[in-house]
Image (tube, grey):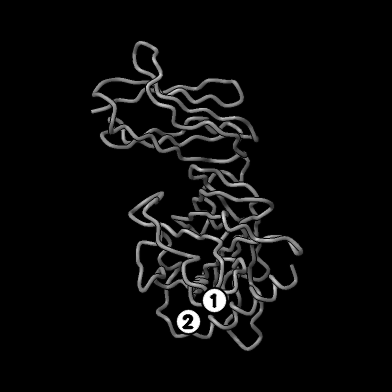
Amino acid sequence: MLIFVFMKKYFFLVFILAFTHSAFCQLQNPSFELWDAGDPVYWQTSNFYDPGTAIQSNDAHGGDFALSMNVALDSNGIAVAPYALNIFPLTTMPEVLTFWMKGNLQGNNSINASFTLIETDTNANILAYGDQTFSTVSNVYQYKFVNVLPFLGPSLFGQGSIYFAITAPVGNSLNVSSSVIIDDLYLGADNTGLLSGDKNKQIIEQLYPNPAREMAYLVFNKKEYSEVRLNVYDMLGNMVKEVLHENMPEGKFKAEINTSELNAGVYFCKLTIDGIDYSCKLIKQ
């Protein structure tokens, strides 16, 4: 862990020099739509040292592209931890970093997500910090957040950084089958409703587009780790598509329903969480 922290600080100090004269703005390229020479624009990745560990993905939560980070072997056959780093000027004190993530973690591998805001003067005081490690991810997009803790007043000019990496505890190995896809970052005031502990949030939050042609998306919330099933039924009660069946942690998710092979008509999506059914109507055009 000490080595990981040292590397993280080292990369931060090196890349902050490169970004000092960049155009003033907030978080840059938050949905990974802009790419250049294998890297998302405004982001630094492990590709600089180990090509192929942080690449463009078409499996996006929103827009056309997302960031896919994959553990890979270097030329010596050693598993390399992928990372992505974005450094940008910032004049406001954010409350939360949110993003959507899906993937596959093997063994005790995990995802580290952090935000740091430092004062851009000779003292380089830390103005705010947030750090979260996620040990489980799902094969459907899940809404994640990192709470940001302010240390000094919000009026100070600062340099922000966001850092993602697949990691393993000290003494343990990275697994070459571990991978994650990250998309649609937000940094700012808390508008999620999650930090306030809203216990009345609906289980099925949204189904869109509805009517659907090629694809529909079901956004749902769950409050604890449990088994989740999502199936589509016709009007006669026949199951026509199994969308999801896995154990999932608490949080907010977006399941993808491929409707391209369904005939035009009315269907029902049945979401079963820990044995309790929730349903909504789906119209296929």
| Pointer 2 or 1: first along the chain | 2
Asked whether 262 or 221 is in front, the reply is: 262
- Quadrant of residue 82 in the image? bottom right
Residue type at mark 2 is: Phe
- Residue underneath mark 2: 19
Residue 159, numbered circle: 1
Tag 2–tag 1 contact (CB < 8 Å): yes
Can residue 90 be seen in this snapshot? no
Check the image and name the residue furthest to the top.
236
Is 131 rendered above or below residue 230?
below
Residue 45 position within the rendered picture, expressed as x and y whole percent measured from the top left: 50, 71
Q: Residue at x 65, y 55 (%)?
A: 109
Residue 283 position within the rendered picture, expressed as x and y whole percent measured from the top left: 29, 25
Q: Quadrant of the N terminus?
A: bottom right
Residue 197 position within the rendered picture, expressed as x and y whole percent measured from the top left: 63, 40
Q: State which mark lies toward you, 2 or 1.
A: 2
Q: Residue at x 50, y 65 (%)?
A: 53
Q: Secondary structure at mark 2?
A: helix
